[in-house]
Amino acid sequence: MKRSDTIGIVGAGQFGTALASVLARAGKQVVLWSRDHQVVSSINMKRVCPRLPSAPLPQPLEATADPKRLAQEARFLVMAVSSTDVRDRAKEFGAYLDGSHIVVHAIGALATPTNERVSEVMSLGLPTLKIGVLAGPALPQDLAEGEFASMVCASSFNEVVDEARRLLNAPPALRLYGSKDLAGVELASALAGAYTVALGLCDGLGMGAGPRAVLITRAVAEAGRLVVAAGGQQKTFGGLSGLGNLLVRASDRSEDYKLGKRLADGVMTAEAERTEGARAALAGAQLAKQLKARLPVLTGVAAVLSGKAEVREVATLIGDTVATEE
């Protein structure tokens, strides 16, 4: 298999493994990178990954713990690590990549602790300018089970989007769409996770279908304002990376949603146990303050997560807030 046709995936977590399994089942050559040598051994010898045992791992998929090998064998890379790790992984792989590489990330949060968009952080650590984002309604479990899923790749470079669609499109299990709104898709993906926590809170409080519909409507309006304030397009949150992402995650198959329900039950989560959606809510609220964007729902969720407000207090405050923009 040619280097240009090989897909490298950085990170053997649930999403990275599920994506790798979908692509390998479609006959594509995939190399999955993990720092954990036991995970690498399990994939190569037992054809299973401990972090997502439900994902079948066919023969076209190989695993490695060597970043140099991944850089040599694959021109197209998907960064599928935590928002807390992306800065370090970008620096680590930056030592082996060059300007010919294409790197897209699938991280639904802002990079901690600076609250920058992930592409901005990657651009500081990687030698290539060909960077993009991958986002949309594609849960790891759905990908692993071969359920229908769609995602969008956004980049300011046409080549990034074209190569993503060529290499990652694997219908009917996974369909890829394109966008040039890099900032908008990145923020939409992060905010979708944040508002998923809000939906978990809403359902955990038993607020009913009416308030739930209002919450989703207000989330779309709020997120659109923040996306525009950050330089993206308002319509982007209404697409796959935002609203589509939010709707597919509003169930117990999403860690963000389950976190919201736990918060509704009064169970506080330690900082180390926060989900990407929780981190996105906290970072998004800070970004909204910096950009002077009015986001009462997101601000309320952040207040609950940081222990500054009680759940029912925030729910009442949000319900009483006049939202003329929506």
Image (tube, helix red, strand yellow):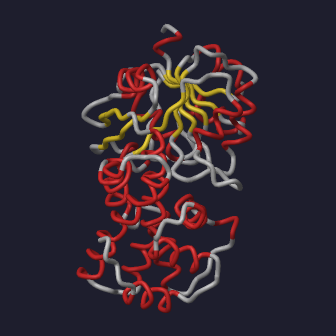
Q: Quadrant of residue 324?
A: bottom left
Q: Quadrant of residue 322?
A: bottom left
Q: Nearer the viewer, residue 109 or 32?
A: 109
Image position of 300 (left or right of 89): left
- Relative to 323, is 139 above or below? above
At horizontal 37% and vertical 59% (from top left) the residue drawn is 246
Image position of 310 (left or right of 149): right
At horizontal 52% and vertical 22% (from top left) the residue drawn is 76
Please state, as top left, top right, bottom left or bottom right, where the C terminus lies in the image: bottom left
At horizontal 36% and vertical 79% (from top left) the residue drawn is 203
User: In the image, residue 261 lies at what x, y percent?
Assistant: 46, 77
Whether residue 111 appears in this view of the structure is yes
Q: How many callouts does the rendering have?
A: 0
Whether residue 77 appears in this view of the structure is no
User: In the image, residue 19 lies at what x, y percent?
Assistant: 45, 37
Image position of 69 (left or right of 221): right
Image position of 104 (left or right of 56): right
Q: Nearer the viewer, residue 104 or 260?
A: 104
User: In the image, residue 133 lies at what x, y percent?
Assistant: 48, 38
At horizontal 34% and vertical 65% (from top left) the residue drawn is 221
- Relative to 178, is 287 above or below? below
User: In the image, residue 311 lies at what x, y percent?
Assistant: 51, 87
Q: Nearer the viewer, residue 224 or 153?
A: 224
